[in-house]
Image (tube, rainbow, N blue to C red):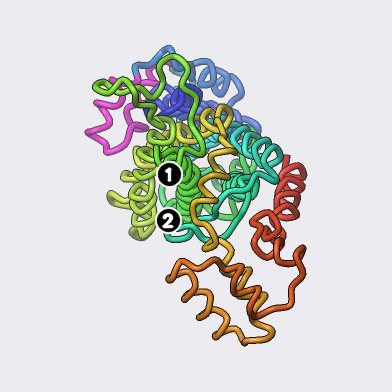
Amino acid sequence: MFGDQRVDRELDGSAWLAAMLDVERALARAQARAGLVPPEAADAVAAACRPQLYDAAALGRQARDAANPVVPLVKALTAQVPRHAAAYVHFGATSQDVLDTAAMLVTRRALEPVQQELAAAADACAALAEAHRDTILAARTLLQHALPTTFGLKCAGWLVALDEARAGLAAVPLAVQLGGAAGTLAAFGPSGPTVVRLLAQELDLPEPTLPWHTDRVRIGQLAGALGVAAGVLGKVALDVVLLAQTEVAEVAEPADGGRGGSSAMPHKRNPVGAVRVLAGTRRVPALVATLLAAMAQEHERAAGAWQAEWETLTEALRLVGGAAATTRELLSGLQVDAGRMRRNLAASGDALMSESVAARLAPDLGRAEAQELVRAALAEGRPLRSLLEAHTTLNAEQMAAALDPAAYLGAAAELVDRALSAHRSRR
């Protein structure tokens, strides 16, 4: 309910198994290129790194005895290769090297569809912003009518946030992990740095400056970027939920195929896409907190904090991926009622133009007195036009502009254009 098929299949047990085997294969090939492993042994190891040869669930159960799944995987992998190659399986590496690098592969593979969904959601926002560049509605601050704005500007705000969240995920510095038992690369002798470089080439991942066994900056940055993306997606969903309330009814989600129906009330049309996004994204901050809390790790190898990362990271990726896909879906089919927006705006009467009127009165009366006069008129139910007539020399055209919501949109249209331009540049 909270995931996305394309993202989920990059995160399940089979995906993690495949990633770990990819690392073992790449390690053997890198060592062969460095002259540490006979080429025929590396070929034998590579041939045995086929996921269908292994039972991911069984490896998971066996992992309990070693506190990580790499130990049983290496045992199973060794049993699959000829005797002459057995000594070169997992040669010089430690379990964390394999699992951390696999986590980088899993993350990269999962983030690809996540990024695509975020980009598509942003495209949908751009289309809405362009179509409703001049569609007026009431801005709401503290859930109360504030000033006139445009629905295009609201969508432009979503657009910029989605683009920035996507850029944040793209900037996370993924890298291979290879340090050996204590992060010194001792088992490789003078060839250690060369093996790291070649492993990075094999997996098309960046080469780190140092092994990062207990330097969890990458995981922390990834957690933060996922948390930001979740927050952005949650904000869009929350706005949609509020705009779709019966009393507001300015937008509605698609209702095809009975979507949004109630088990008890036939008349209901619930914003179920936004609800799913909110339910999923509200779980992400706790996962981010866990990943950040796990950054403090003991000496050269963690006793529990590292192990706390795997399922936490997987779930955060899954929830953000699902929220991104659902947001793209609901924005692509969002139904906008411009007439309802205009009627809701008119419900506030003169109050929505209080700032405009006070600004017209201020040159002669001073800002404080002008605002006080406006407050008093609104409290007494007097039209603000009467204040303008009594205290200014505005002509009819100026008077109409002071009370017209469409004339008090500031730079809204220009800001929409800026957001659209920035989006086109990013894309």
Q: Gap between marks 2 and 1, in whole Å?
A: 9 Å
Any magenta on residue 283?
no
> Which image quadrant: the C terminus?
top right
> From where the camera sits, is residue 196 visible?
yes
**What segment carries the magenta color?**
56-82
- Which residue, given by chain and number where applicable, does mark 1 sit on? 242
Query: In this picture, is 46 found above or below 118?
Result: above
The residue nearer to you, when weighing 45 against 263, is 263
Which of the 4 image quarters holds residue 13? top left
| Residue sitting at x 62%, y 71% | 357
Any magenta on residue 66?
yes
Left or right: 125 as drawn, with respect to 1: right
Tag 2: amino acid: Leu
Query: In this picture, is 56 found above or below 92?
Result: above
Tag 1: amino acid: Leu
Q: Position of residue 384 (x, y in %)?
A: 57, 68
